[in-house]
Amino acid sequence: MPPSSEPGDRRPPESGRPTLERAPGERYRVAEASGAPARPRSTARAVGIGALVALAGAVLIVVLGGVFSLSAGLIVLAGAIGWWIGRVVAATADPSRGSTIRWIVAVALALDAVVLGQLGLWVHSLSQGGALGLIDYLVEARGLLVPAEILVAVALAWWSAR
């Protein structure tokens, strides 16, 4: 009577059955096997790609906050922008420079994204017939949402870039 097998047990090798030259999972190690060079990582590259993400985030703030009149949802958007900036900076920055430069770059870009987005909202309000100055507009129309957006974006950029 053959012994009972449990899931995950290995079968004894059968005579005449071919064995593999290498493990099946090795085919997923494409970069190592093909000798393809890894993408260069540098602080300048991190700043450039992070700035593109920040610019896209600022445009999203203007579109969702100005065109679609979203208000409290911009806090969630600011958090997502900060998180994405932090992840992009962490993925493209030179790891030998340490984590301090990564989170400084990420925090600065997240702050820039939210501030540029708020400037865009003000310009959009002027195009719709608004007459308030920048500070008056931000205080009257956005209130405490602006500091909340900045705080959330900066905190998530710092956290995801560490």
Image (cartoon, rainbow, N blue to C red):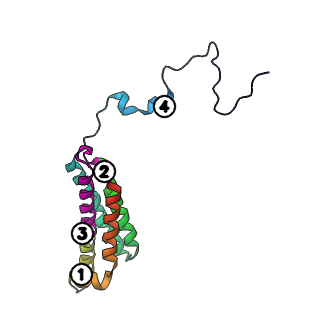
Mark carried by residue 25: 4
Which one is earlier in the sequence, the residue at label 1 or at label 2?
2
- The type of residue carrying mark 1 is Leu
Which secondary structure lies at badge 3?
Answer: helix
Question: x, y (%) of residue 147?
Answer: 30, 75
Which secondary structure lies at badge 2?
Answer: helix
Q: Of tags 1 and 2, which is closer to the observer?
A: 2
Q: Of tags 4 and 3, which is closer to the observer?
A: 4
Which secondary structure lies at badge 4?
Answer: helix
Which one is earlier in the sequence, the residue at label 4 or at label 2?
4
The residue pinned by badge 1 equals 126
Quadrant including the C terminus: bottom left
Q: Distance between the residues labelled 4 and 3?
A: 46 Å
- The type of residue carrying mark 2 is Ala
Extreme-right residue of the structure: 1
Which secondary structure lies at badge 1?
Answer: helix
Q: Main secondary structure of the magenta part?
A: helix
| The magenta segment | 92-115
Q: How many labels does the image show?
A: 4
CB-based contact (under 8 Å), mark 1 and mark 2: no
CB-based contact (under 8 Å), mark 4 and mark 3: no
Which one is earlier in the sequence, the residue at label 3 or at label 2?
2
Question: x, y (%) of residue 151?
Answer: 32, 70
The residue pinned by badge 2 equals 90
Which one is earlier in the sequence, the residue at label 1 or at label 4?
4
Q: Distance between the residues labelled 4 and 2?
A: 27 Å
